[in-house]
Image (tube, grey):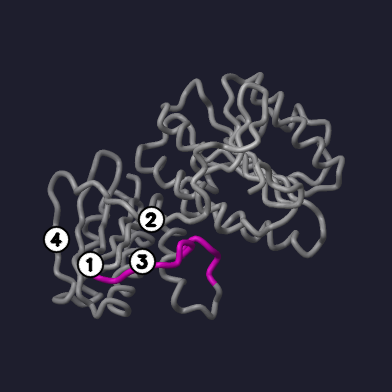
Amino acid sequence: MSLMPTPEAFVHEAFLYDDDRQFYDRTVPFIDEGVAAGDTVIVVLDRARIDSLRSLVSSAHGDVQYWDMAEVGLNPGRLMSAWVPFVEENRTTGRKLRGIGEPIWSGRSDAEIQECQRHEALLNVAFGDTSGFSLMCPYDRSALDEHVLADAGRTHPTLIEDGRRSLLSPDYEGEEIDPFAGRLPEPSGVVEELDLSRLTLDRVRRTVADHAAGLDERRSSEFVLAVNEAVTNTLRHAEGVGILRLWREDVSVICDVVDHGSIRDPLAGRLPADATDTEGRGLWLIHQLCDLVQIRSSETSTTVRMHMYL
């Protein structure tokens, strides 16, 4: 087995940095060299980082796209839908692609970080056979917990650390992952639990709308629509047998839809939905509507947990 990806293979690197100087010393040349080589470059960072990079890179008028991570990736499950069109659009041009994406930052909740880590692992599945695409993922060692930094080595084939580039991350787990494995924490506080086999969709929508009090009208409607999609999946794929749980935590209104169905496609719900694909649109739409989505699935059950921030 080769210790280093070939130059034309998908290069997915975790860049561990300690301060702003290290961050810009690595990212600015990465952007400038890409533009000089005729690559298409996309930068997905927080707004402050983007503003600083715009003033530092010499390729101000090159083919560089800047996206605010707080908008594109608030829900990590939406990030793949942003990357895929970018890659597909440029695949036919023959141009190489360079990207910088920092989905994990200090202040993310534990649940958000878990979904970011699953996203990082799925990038290897989605783009493993994409040649000429280099993606650098910065991790702030001064702010992130050790277990988060350790997971970077498991989800990235190569590492950049202390100014050096590792030939191979010794902990990399490869593309054979199950993004739906594991268990979600049990709901806390007062939980309303409903038997879906005894409810109409209209009753589900009214109940969810009642729990969404505190959200503005648009976000309340989006939450109701997301739950409606999850319940519709239960009706379609699990014979309508399942439960719905609703509760609130400090900053969120949350809903679980649990049934005996099983999801096996690792990218289910992550890729842009085809208008003709009736099987995958529900999960994709749920990701687009909610602030955070967590999906866990085994051979015997599936839980779709949807969060909307108050």
Kindly state the secondary structure of the residue where label 1 is placed.
Answer: helix
Kindly state the secondary structure of the residue where label 2 is placed.
Answer: helix
Given the image, on which type of amino acid does mark 1 rest? Arg
Q: Residue at x 53, y 63 (%)?
A: 271
The front one of 260 and 143 is 260
Q: Is residue 49 left or right of residue 228?
A: right
Q: Is residue 114 left or right of residue 187?
A: right
The front one of 49 and 111 is 111
Query: Whole-Å distance between the Cαs marked 2 and 4?
Result: 22 Å
What residue is pinned by disc 4? 193
Q: Is residue 113 above or below residue 175?
A: above
Query: Whole-Å distance between the Cαs marked 4 and 3?
Result: 19 Å
What residue is pinned by disc 2? 219
Kindly state the secondary structure of the residue where label 4 is placed.
Answer: strand
Circle 3 residues within 10 Å: few <14, some 14–19, many ≥20: some
Q: Residue 251 in the image: state x and y as whole percent.
A: 30, 40
* Marks 4 and 1 in Cβ contact (< 8 Å): no
* Marks 1 and 2 in Cβ contact (< 8 Å): no
* Residue 212, picture quadrant: bottom left
What residue is pinned by disc 1? 206
Tell which circle, 2 or 3, labels the residue nearer the N-terminal end: 2
* Marks 3 and 1 in Cβ contact (< 8 Å): no
Circle 2 residues within 10 Å: few <14, some 14–19, many ≥20: some
Q: Residue 209 in the image: state x and y as whole percent.
A: 26, 61
Span of residues in magenta: 259-273
Query: Whole-Å distance between the Cαs marked 4 and 1?
Result: 14 Å
What residue is pinned by disc 3? 225
Residue mark closest to the camera, 2 vs 4: 4
Given the image, on which type of amino acid does mark 3 rest? Leu
Residue mark closest to the camera, 4 vs 1: 4
